[in-house]
Image (cartoon, rainbow, N blue to C red):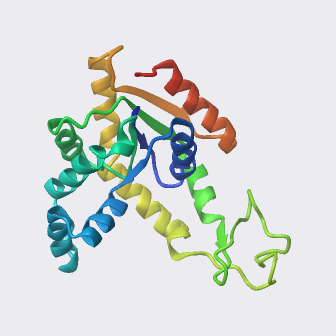
Amino acid sequence: MRLMLLGCPGVGKGTQARFITEKYHIPMISTGDMLRAATLAGTPLGKQAKEYMDQGFLVPDDVIIGLVRERVAQADCQNGFLLDGFPRTIPQAEALAANNINLDHIIEIDVPQDEIIKRLSGRRIHPGSGRVYHLVYHPPKKDEKDDITGEPLVQRLDDTEEVILKRLRVYHEQTAALVDYYQQKANETIHQGPFYSRINGLGTEEEVKEKIFAALENTAIS
């Protein structure tokens, strides 16, 4: 099963990706992880990518596509994979298809913006240990204090409402167009894939997980 998760920051993609990869025994393919592995291994594409990164440039799409092509050819992808963070744009999605890296199912997790802001802005961190709290969903025993040490919790810069709104704006400007792109693909190839499912991301992690599993199993491609 070759899958992709779509959705704004804060909808729970990371949590649900873990559930999916564990259930279907497929690897999650992160472009960041691939870049690090390829540069460490010193592969030809890794060397190309390192040259761009060392100069502070974005790695071009053709290099990223080459890395994805190499990665999905590895043995652990025999039963499928889950793409994480790629593609982000329609040209990248088109390049995937042009390289015969086809997807079976795209899952979009949909959560209202006000809920996303509440989820992300309520997060607090204990700097010394990395323990994570949430003022609404997982509050500390004492207000803004770590349960173990009693030390003050902090809010990360990227969890402030100003930064969250900027991240959401970037998503809608750059990545949200993939929703229309893949929905159109799904409508053109009904019963053949790629399938497209929009999942209501409100509810507990378990409830969202069950919705995703139901969508995948109803349209499973062997």
Q: Residue at x 53, y 40 (%)?
A: 20
Q: Position of residue 18 (x, y in %)?
A: 55, 48
Q: Is residue 153 left or right of residue 117?
A: right
Q: Is 152 in front, or is 56?
A: 56
Q: Is 164 in front, or is 192?
A: 192
Q: Position of residue 118 (x, y in %)?
A: 63, 57
Q: Residue at x 51, y 43 (%)?
A: 21
Q: Position of residue 222 (x, y in %)?
A: 40, 22
Q: Which image quadrant is residue 35 in? A: bottom left
Q: Which image quadrant is residue 39 in? A: bottom left
Relative to 130, say whether 179 is above or below.
above
Q: Is residue 57 left or right of residue 215?
A: left
Q: Which image quadrant is residue 183 in? A: top left
Relative to 50, say whether 99 is above or below.
above
Relative to 159, say whether 206 is above or below.
above
Residue sticking out furthest to the top: 191
Q: Residue at x 40, y 34 (%)?
A: 79
Residue sticking out furthest to the right: 141
Q: Is 197 in front, or is 99?
A: 99
Q: Is 163 in front, or is 220?
A: 220
Q: Is residue 209 left or right of residue 220?
A: right
Q: Residue at x 70, y 79 (%)?
A: 153
Count of numbered labels shown in the rendering: 0
Q: Position of residue 45 (x, y in %)?
A: 16, 62
Q: Which part of the image, by quadrant, shows the N terminus?
A: top left
